[in-house]
Amino acid sequence: MDIEIRHFEQEDIEAIKEIYNQPHAIEGTLQLPYQSFGHWKNRLESIGSSFICLVAEMDGKVVGQLGIHTFDRPRRKHVAMLAIAVSQNAQGKGVADKLMSTAVDLCDNWLNVRRIELQVFVDNPRAISLYKKHGFAEEGVLVDFGFKNGKYVSAFTMARINGQSI
């Protein structure tokens, strides 16, 4: 199956909402369940030039989304933050890997980003493995970072420095 990565379009909002409303995405991100189309429409229509929203498409259907947030502040212009989610039925098919490869290429070769950072719950070994594959290293633990399923969960802060191993 071919995976196409492209910038999101307005007609992708419903598919992105559906991805983030899936139980695994709610559990693995800081999203709340039951988000409306209006919530996602407002969120995606109000993104500025410091946010790049990519989607992964398979067989004409949006199955993944990745956000790259860059910073305007002079002392953080070299940094980007990533967030990613892939539809349950597309997991294990290379979608997240292709989204991450695309994000790293954009950051390294087009956006002049030196440091890419993210947070990931410590109980998400699949995501941690993906990030390590793309050169990210654990920098620290954020204790009780998020609340999910009735309890606090810690997260790793991970980063990748262009041209270096951490």
Image: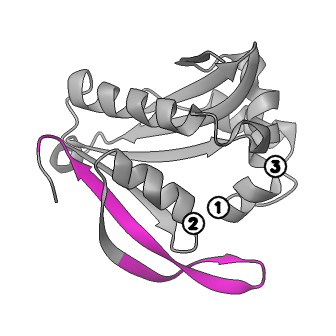
Q: Give how far across and how far down residue 142 sits, in percent.
A: 42, 79
> In the rendering, which numbered label is found on residue 21?
3
Question: Does the magenta segment cover residue 153?
Answer: yes
Residue 50 visible to an observer of this rendering: no
Amino acid found under the numbered disc labelled 1: Gly
Magenta segment's dominant SS is strand
Amino acid residing under circle 2: Asn
Of the two numbered discs 2 and 3 in the rendering, the one whose residue sits closer to the viewer: 2
48 and 53: which is toward the camera: 53
Q: CA distance from mark 2 to mark 3?
A: 18 Å
| Mark sitting earlier along the chain (2/1) | 1
Horizontally, is 111 left or right of 60 in the view? left
Residue furthest left as drawn: 164
Q: Nearer the viewer, mark 2 or mark 1?
A: 2
Secondary structure category for the residue under label 3:
loop
In which image quadrant can residue 29 be found?
bottom right
Residue at the spot of label 1: 28
Q: Residues within 10 Å of mark 2 (few under 14, many from 20)?
A: few
Write the start and end of the magenta stretch as one range: 141-163
